[in-house]
Image: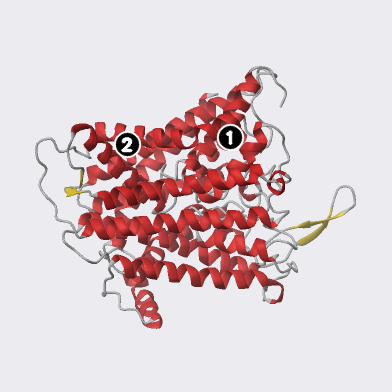
Amino acid sequence: MSSHDLLIIVLFIGILVSFTPFLGKWLASVLMGRQTWLPPVLGPVERCVYRMAGVDPTREMDWKKYLTAVLLFNAAGFLVLFLSLLCQKWLPLNPAGTENMRWDIALNTAISFVTNTNWQFYSGEGPEGVSYFVQMTGLGVQNFVSAGTGIAVMSALIRGLERRCASTLGNFWTDLTRSMLYFLVPVSTVIALLLVSQGVVQSFDGPIAVPGMDGVEQMIPSGPAASQIAIKQLGANGGGFFGNNSTHPFENPTPFSNMVEMLSLLLAGCACPYAYGVMIGKKRQGWIIFGAMMILLVAAIVLSQWAEHAGNPLFPGMEMLEGKEVRLGVTNSSLWSVATTASSNGSVNCMHSSMSPLGGGIALFNMLLGGVIFGGLGCGLYSMLMFAMITVFLCGLMVGRTPEFLGKKMGAREVCCSMVGILLPGMAVLVMSGLAAATETGRASICNAGPHGLTEILYCFGSQAGNNGSAFAGLAAGDTPFYSLLGGLAMLLARFGTIISVMMIAGSMASRKTAPPAQGTMGTDNLMFMVLLVAVVLVVGALTFFPALALGPILEHLLLYSGAML
């Protein structure tokens, strides 16, 4: 690794840390209804939205009404997108002549974009992809509203932790509207303009036919890509406009566009813990959560960079270049793989299946942790806060004290809901991976034998249940309805099962009184708690998934270094 490579990593982390307070304070102001510099421009738009929807923005909801609104809104979004994909052939703005999508692929795709996962069983271009109209009015809209849903649920949990003896958690429609109008739309607009300046495609023209060097006509794809790429990066969505996602030069043409897109993966996720600190009036709490996430991120970056630069021991002196864009290099590709799996995004600028066993294993492990390393918008924070509650509970058991979090006593309800929210995605991954490995239909889609084949299955369900969407492309998962239907179920269980748990915790904690810290109360705003939190995240992740990982990427890594040809 050269000094230039180190500079890229240091610059990446430095920009993330420096932008965190600005974006975090902005997001907190939006969610708290405070004045920002945007209301004079967008205030009339916000009020118009409320009037058209018949919503009273001042009327707050209890946790049950808030949860009902979340579920009904997402169910309506799923139905509209599902029908759009089934009928896209007859809809306008379809210059490429895109066909209607197969029903099981349409079902999986609709669930995928509604749950902010963006797993794709289809190529983003060509007659079997998605038309421009559905890209903009279906997938593009869900990129915004699914991210807004995560932010809204996060804000409800924060209010539940901050309020005392309260029965309400805010208004879902207000949180959703404000998070999109005042945060997601402005930031993604800036990102889109930066990408267009670098040559990212933004056009309504159809594919362009040009003669190739061999005389055979070649179709060059086009479309409104830059606007979609901006929100798919910022909103932790990840679904590619083109087939190769951000490895495609039309999505990611220059080193500057690569850095912009890579930073966009984590900027909003980094802002969430800072916003949490501002909203509860204890910024140090937010920095501790941020620090725990950053420790896990840096550790993953170091391990992945080492594995990819070390290369294959059978070919000493060579880096792992297979599946990577030479114009981007190993460092940018490895850094992106960690950022995209840590952020629950799933966009790629290299092929993860072609990475070293350890490099691919790090990407897989990031997802299996439940998206707590910054994660998706809102999702990463509320997942980490559940881990924080479990950490407080375990420490309370060791000293014989009733666990307290932010001055509120935790009962069996909070602990049980936290464990369900943490373990449900893992259960979905392991059960469905087991079904795929145990059935002939599941094994028929595996393109690689041995431990890599098992890793492909684990990655498939880990990505979908982990709210990520990236893939080990060696698994021919789209050939049969088996993986599309099981994957859709995994996404629903992991996304909404966790949201239900979070809302139950929020409602319960909001109703509790706060008490001043007594002697022996465990502080949650110090370095010791940060270290304990990281340890609990790793221990729970290791205990849950170590047997499966041992048979997949760990075994493949050991075989590689023993001289075996894989």
Q: Amino acid at mark 2?
A: Leu
The x, y position of residue 382, in whole percent, is: 35, 51
The x, y position of residue 62, in whole percent, is: 27, 68
The x, y position of residue 49, in whole percent, is: 39, 77
Q: CA distance from mark 2 to mark 1?
A: 25 Å
Quarter placement of the N terminus: top right
Please state which of residues 288 and 417 is positioned toward the viewer in this rendering: 417
Left or right: 132 with respect to 72?
right
Quarter placement of the C terminus: top right
Question: Residue 428 got which mark?
Answer: none
Report the residue marked by disc 2: 533
Q: Are marks 2 and 1 in contact (CB under 8 Å)?
A: no
Mark 2 vs mark 1: give the one in front: 2
Residue visible at 58% across and 51% down in the picture: 198
The x, y position of residue 8, in whole percent, is: 50, 34
Report the residue marked by disc 1: 360
Residue visible at 63% across and 55% down in the picture: 120
